[in-house]
Amino acid sequence: MFGESNFRLVGSGLSCPEGPVVEDDGSVLVCEVRGAALVRVSPGGSRTVVANLPSGANGAAIGPDGAAYVATNGSFTFADVEGITHITGLIEDWVGGALYRVDRTTGEVRELFTESEGQHLGSLNDVVFDADGGAYIADTTSGLLHYAVPAERRIGVAVSDVVTPNGVGLSPDGSRLYVSETFTGRLRTFEVVGPGKLLPLPDVFQHPAAAQDDTEGIDLQQSKQFWDGLAVDGEGNLVVADLASSGVRVVSPLGAELAFFETPERDPYVTCVAFGGPDGRTAYVTSGGRGRLYAIDNWPFEGGRVNFQP
C-alpha cells in the first residue's frame, strides 16, 4: 500500500507547521515552529492565530480540562531554499523550551514548566496525554522523556536513555509508549507500568535507510534525519512522519511495515500526524518545509483517537 493519491490539501501558507490537533468541528490546531504560534486551520483552509508563543511551537495535545498544552523549542534559525523552509540550528542565545497551557477559546497563554528535576527543559517536541491526565513530553536536545501532571504542577524525568526523541504515542490500551528517535531511525517501545513509569522493551522498527552504526556523540547539526512525529491508529499501528522519505510510514506493533504514503511534493520536513473525523479515519499530516496541512481520507486501518480529544 504505497502512493501519494490519498493526500488532500487542507491548508497552506503556514509557518513551518507541526503538532496537529484535531478539534470536534473538523478544525485543526497546528503548531507553527517558525511562526511561534498556535493556529487554527478551518475545514475550508483559513488560518487564524489562537495564541502567540514566546518561541517556536513544536508539539501540542488537548488535556483533561479542554485546554491545549503546547511544547516549545526555544527557537531555531531558518533558511528558505527553493520553496522549502529548512531548520538550520538553534538561535545564538538559546536557553531551551517550555510547556504552556493555551485556552483554545480566549487564547490565554500560561507558562507551566521551564525545568524538570532542576534542569532546564531542552528543545521540546511531541506531547501525549495518558488516561490519568499526565503528559509524556519528548525533549529532543536533552535526550529525555518528561512526565508532567499539569493539574498538580508536577513534572519529572520518565526516561533518560533516549537519543533525539521526537514523536511520542500511546497504544490504544495505554500499555505501551512509542518513541521515534530522529537521528538513529529507531522506533522505541516502553511498557507503561504506572503513570510516568516506563520499562524499555525491544525496538519495534528501524528506518530502512538508517545506518547501523554507533549513535553516541551525535552532532545535532550534522546527522541525517529519519523520523519526526508519530501517531497511533485504532489498530495500534505506528504512523510515523518520515523525514528521509517525505511521507508517512505505517508500522504494525509487531514491527511489520504496512504502508507508505508519499507527499505530492517532496518535503524533507514532513513533521507530524494526527487523526480526526467522526470515525477517526482522517489522518492529518503537516508538511513543515512547504507550509502545508494535508489530509489522508479513508484511512485504510481502524481510525485513531487520543485521550481527551474533543
Image (cartoon, rainbow, N blue to C red):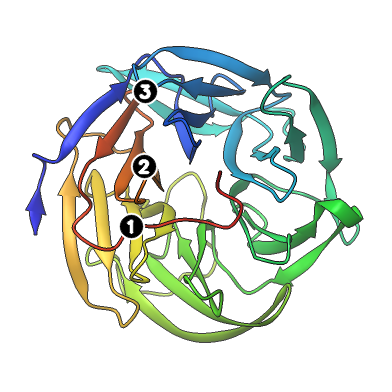
Q: Nearer the viewer, residue 291 or 88?
A: 291
Q: Which numbered tag is attached to residue 23? A: none
Tell me residue 42's x, y (percent).
Answer: 42, 20
Q: Which numbered tag is attached to residue 303? A: 1
Tell me residue 92's x, y (percent).
Answer: 68, 27
Which quadrant of the structure image shows residue 235? Answer: bottom left
Residue 175 drawn above or below residue 282: below
**Is residue 119 something that shows in the picture?**
no
**Circle 3 residues within 10 Å: few <14, some 14–19, many ≥20:** few
Question: Would you say 58 lies left or right of 92 here?
Answer: left
Tell me residue 178's x, y (percent).
Answer: 49, 69
Dot 1 lies on which element? loop
Amino acid at the residue labelled 3 = Pro
Q: Nearer the viewer, residue 83 or 215?
A: 83
Dot 3 lies on which element? loop
Amino acid at the residue labelled 2 = Gly
Residue linked to disc 2: 277
Which tag, 2 or 1, sits closer to the chain's start? 2
Dot 2 lies on which element? loop
Amino acid at the residue labelled 1 = Gly
Question: Would you say 144 lies left or right of 219 here?
Answer: right
**Circle 1 residues within 10 Å: few <14, some 14–19, many ≥20:** many
Residue at x 58% of width, y 15% of height: 49
Q: Are marks 2 and 1 in contact (CB under 8 Å)?
A: yes
Residue at x 47% of width, y 38% of height: 20
Q: Nearer the viewer, residue 61 or 90?
A: 61
Distance from disc 2 to disc 1, alpha carbons, whole Å, reads 9 Å
Q: Which numbered tag is attached to residue 43? A: 3
Which tag, 3 or 1, sits closer to the chain's start? 3
